[in-house]
Amino acid sequence: MISEELLDQFRLEGTKVRVIRDADPINDIKGYVMAWNDQLVMLKKLNKKVLKLDRQYQYQPWDLPR
C-alpha cells in the first residue's frame, strides 16, 4: 500500500503517476493524484476524467521505467 507521505508528495508536486494494476502494461493508468482515503485514491486522468482506484495497486512516477 502506498504511503500518505508519498501520495501527498505526488499531489503537491503535480507528478504524473503510473498505476500498475496487473502484468500487462496496456492496463496501466496515468494521471495526477487528487485525493485519497484509507482504501481509495482519486486520480485525474489526462483526459480530465476522474477515477477512484484501490490503494493496493502500485503507484510510481510516470518517468520511471515499468
Image (cartoon, rainbow, N blue to C red):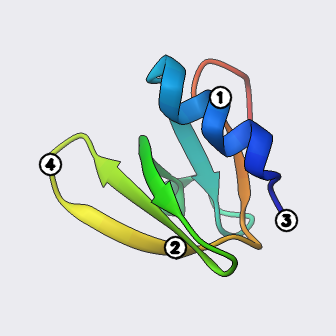
Query: Which structural element holds mark 1?
Result: helix
* Amino acid type, mark 4: Lys
| Mark 3 and mark 4: Cα distance apart in space | 25 Å
- Give the residue pinned by disc 1: 9
Q: Earlier in the sequence, mark 1 or mark 2?
A: 1
Q: Earlier in the sequence, mark 1 or mark 4?
A: 1
- Give the residue pinned by disc 2: 53
* Amino acid type, mark 3: Met
- Give the residue pinned by disc 3: 1
- Give the residue pinned by disc 4: 48
Left or right position of 5 against 28 = right
| Mark 1 and mark 2: Cα distance apart in space | 18 Å
Q: Are marks 1 and 2 in contact (CB under 8 Å)?
A: no
Left or right position of 58 against 12 = right
Q: Residue at x 34, y 69 (%)?
A: 51
Visible residue check, residue 40: yes
* Amino acid type, mark 1: Gln
Residue density around tag 2, few if under 14, some if 14–19, many if 20 or more, within 10 Å? some
* Amino acid type, mark 2: Leu
Q: Earlier in the sequence, mark 3 or mark 2?
A: 3
| Mark 1 and mark 4: Cα distance apart in space | 21 Å
Q: Residue at x 72, y 67 (%)?
A: 57
Q: Earlier in the sequence, mark 3 or mark 4?
A: 3
| Mark 2 and mark 4: Cα distance apart in space | 15 Å
Query: Which structural element holds mark 2?
Result: strand
Q: Foreground mark, 3 or 1?
A: 1
Q: Position of residue 48 (x, y in %)?
A: 14, 48
